[in-house]
Image (tube, rainbow, N blue to C red):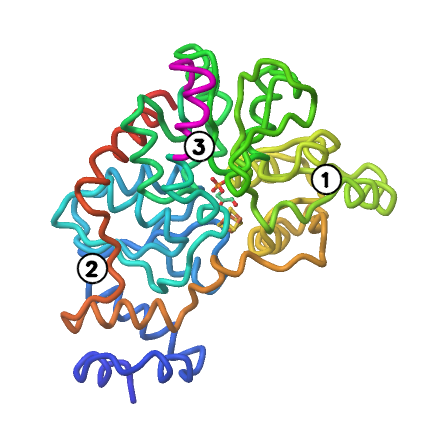
Amino acid sequence: MSATDSLATGPTSLTEYRALPSEELDLRIRRAKAALGKDLVILGHHYQRDDVIAHSDYRGDSLQLARIAANLREAKYIVFCGVHFMAETADILTSDDQMVILPDMNAGCSMADMADEQEVEECWEIITERFGESIIPVTYVNSAAAIKAFVGSRGGLTITSSNAARVFAHALEAKERILFLPDQHLGRNTGAACGIPLSRMCVYDPKEMLLEYPHGEADPRVILWKGHCSVHTKFEPRHVRQAREAYPGIRVLVHPECTYETVQLADENGSTDYIIRAVQNAPAGTKWAIGTEHNLVNRLAQEHPEQFIVSLNEMICPCLTMNRIDRPHLLWSLENIIAGTPQNQIRVSPNIAGAAKVAIERMLNIS
Ligand code: 13P
Ligand code: SF4
């Protein structure tokens, strides 16, 4: 079947898309984009596969993609090559007549899934009973829309890894303590970057429903939800030491979802956008060991042959959910839009979207 046949007859099943040869996938994606013109924008997170990112109109980190989505006026269809919470954020920030599509509904985020709405409510009850009204809830954008809404309706806001320190400082001016969801590592690293000692950060365990004080029971300024990223926690201090032994002079650059111990040993840490800019701005001959998702590290190595770039841990698995988005799913989504049968629309219910938008906009206004 040729690309034009498929546009005429409508999409077949995903299984058939998976069987298409590579050149046909690229050709039909390009044709579908041309057919949809200004009605379509494809957004791609930096962790996407190369062959998907090649078709994106914009690529960025989660903050940049949220900003781009908020400013899209013409596009009727926003196909989000990223994970579920990012597509939800785009839906919240776009108008009702725009449709956000996630090419594969299985592209979630295991960290975002670690904060469940009911558990967060239980936590809030426990900590407000203990600390009264002294707490502001702050959630990483890597969380479900319902968690953003929870935070927004209690005077709180969202953060991303590229504005974390600024948002933390802002939140700590408003209240004495922060409840930070759902990534304990980003929260701990950001608290430390803001000068808060580890002894003033405790951890809330949602399964045990109790507070843990790993560094002594001092009055906490940050209450960290016990969540983590299963990709970034695989970059350990021993990998930093091994990289320095193997490649003297190498700079270690990690994402702040890595553990506190790894971040402390690294030379630099920052969001995906920060990592890209650090490499782009470095002189030829710089050596890097980078602790973040493999697709981004490999792309940086290809785009910067003048520098030496390796993964801080070659043995880790990629982010499996980010990698769910592939060209067959992308093409299937685009041809379904053309056929008038769009699939996988991400629709946040209006009662959640309103409060979640408040939390996101509070962040956008200060970053
Ligand atoms: P950024 O905010 O740096 O894009 O990271 C998102 C993410 O999911 C990191 O694991
Ligand atoms: Fe979620 Fe981690 Fe994947 Fe980022 S890398 S999308 S935090 S599981």
Mark 1, ligand 1, within 8 Å: the answer is no
Residue located beneath label 3 in the image: 123
| Magenta-drawn stretch contains 181 | no
Residue at 29 percent across and 86 percent down: it is 2
Residue 276 placement: quadrant: top right
Identify the magenta region: 122-135
Residue 346 located left or right of residue 74: right
Q: Is residue 300 left or right of residue 136?
A: right
Quarter of the view holding residue 145: top left
Alpha-carbon span between mark 1 and mark 3: 46 Å
Q: Residue under label 1, please give it.
A: 286
Q: Which mark is residue 37?
A: 2
Q: Secondary structure at mark 2?
A: helix
Label 1 CA crowd tier, 10 Å (few <14, some 14–19, many 20+): some
Q: Position of residue 216 (x, y in %)?
A: 69, 20
Q: How many marks?
A: 3
The answer to which of 87 and 112 lies nearer the viewer is: 112
Q: Nearer the viewer, residue 75 or 259?
A: 259
Q: Earlier in the sequence, mark 1 or mark 3?
A: 3
